């Protein structure tokens, strides 16, 4: 099976600072990882993904880091903006199984 | 626009009633999923379907039923057997297939409240 947990349920950052949201997973065979952003009353939106053959992937203002040794995934958001305030979920897939979602971290950006 | 349409956005159910939540997609995705989301919790899988006319129970299928008669549609019925149905329901799709590594695309959700 799989369990996915985020280290902090809430995170507050000052506007302009960098944010780091962490996620831990349990199954060493997990091979695909995604970060989603969910704004209030809306469905989750895809942010960035990474496969197990990589340890880092960058997007626009976001970076995902994967440490397979300790089964840890992080999402870094550069120069955090008020529009980044949302709940962030990591999702993990093992082989052909369905995605397994963490419980989410609520990011609050302080102006 | 390609996407997923969930309707209605808000739904109120009386005790003992069955209600059906609609999910329609025009992404030509094979796989469709229903998740339930409660405050402060992650997404819990109710049912999923990898192909038309086939579906599988997820982790919390009791009190729910689905059908997949068309590729585009995956309606979820919340039956009176579901004792605590008040939640936010999310429909998702993916291209599917064991060889694919892709994420899910989500609809905008239906908030169901028991009155």
Image: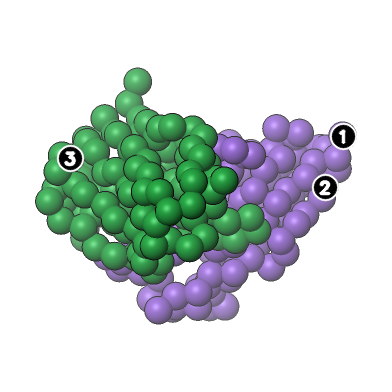
Chain colours: A purple, B green
Residue shown at the point (44%, 75%) measured from the top left: A2
Label 1 crowding class (10 Å Cα cut-off): few <14, some 14-19, many 20+?
few
Q: Secondary structure at mark 2?
A: strand
Report whether A55 appears left or right of B7.
right
Image quarter hosting the N terminus of chain A? bottom left
Residue shown at the point (57%, 46%) measured from the top left: B115
Residue reaching furthest top? B1
Chain of the residue under the numbered disc 1 shown in the image:
A
Q: Nearer the viewer, residue A12 or B40?
A: B40
For mark 1, what is the residue? A111
Q: Are marks 1 and 2 in contact (CB under 8 Å)?
A: no
Chain of the residue under the numbered disc 3 shown in the image:
B
Q: Are marks 3 and 2 in contact (CB under 8 Å)?
A: no
> In the figure, residue B28 lies in which quadrant?
top left
For the residues beneath circles 3 and 2, the answer to whether they share a chain is no
Residue A75 position within the rendered picture, expressed as x and y whole percent measured from the top left? 62, 54
Q: Secondary structure at mark 1?
A: loop
Q: CA distance from mark 3 to mark 2?
A: 43 Å
For mark 3, what is the residue? B71
Report whether A90 appears left or right of B105.
right
Q: CA distance from mark 1 to mark 3?
A: 45 Å
Chain of the residue under the numbered disc 2 shown in the image:
A
Instruction: Check the image and report above or below for A52 versus A45.
Output: below
Residue B51 position within the rendered picture, expressed as x and y whole percent measured from the top left? 16, 51
For the residues beneath circles 1 and 3, the answer to whether they share a chain is no
Which label belongs to residue A13? 2
| Lower sequence index among marks 1 and 2 | 2
Label 2 crowding class (10 Å Cα cut-off): few <14, some 14-19, many 20+?
some
Residue shown at the point (73%, 48%) measured from the top left: A107
């Amino acid at each position: 099976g799989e369990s996915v947990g985020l280290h902090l349920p809430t995170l507050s950052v000052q506007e302009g600072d960098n944010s780091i949201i962490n996620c831990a997973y349990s199954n060493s065979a997990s091979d695909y990882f995604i970060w989603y952003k969910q704004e209030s009353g809306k469905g989750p939106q895809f942010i960035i993904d990474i496969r197990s053959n990589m340890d880092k992937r960058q997007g626009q203002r976001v970076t995902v880091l994967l440490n397979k040794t300790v089964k840890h995934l992080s999402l870094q958001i550069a120069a955090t903006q008020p529009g980044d305030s949302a709940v962030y979920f990591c999702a993990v897939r093992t082989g052909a199984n369905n995605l397994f979602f963490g419980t989410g971290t609520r990011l609050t950006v302080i102006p | 626009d390609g996407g997923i349409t969930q309707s209605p956005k808000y739904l109120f159910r009386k005790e003992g009633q069955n209600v059906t939540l609609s999910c329609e997609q025009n992404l030509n995705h094979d796989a469709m999923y229903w998740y339930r989301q409660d405050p402060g919790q992650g997404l819990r899988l109710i049912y999923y379907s990898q192909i038309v006319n086939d579906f599988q129970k997820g982790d919390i299928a009791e009190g729910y039923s689905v059908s997949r008669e068309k590729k585009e549609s995956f309606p979820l019925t919340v039956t009176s057997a579901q004792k605590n149905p008040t939640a936010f329901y999310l429909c998702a799709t993916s291209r599917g297939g064991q060889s694919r590594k892709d994420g899910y695309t989500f609809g905008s959700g239906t908030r169901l409240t028991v009155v």
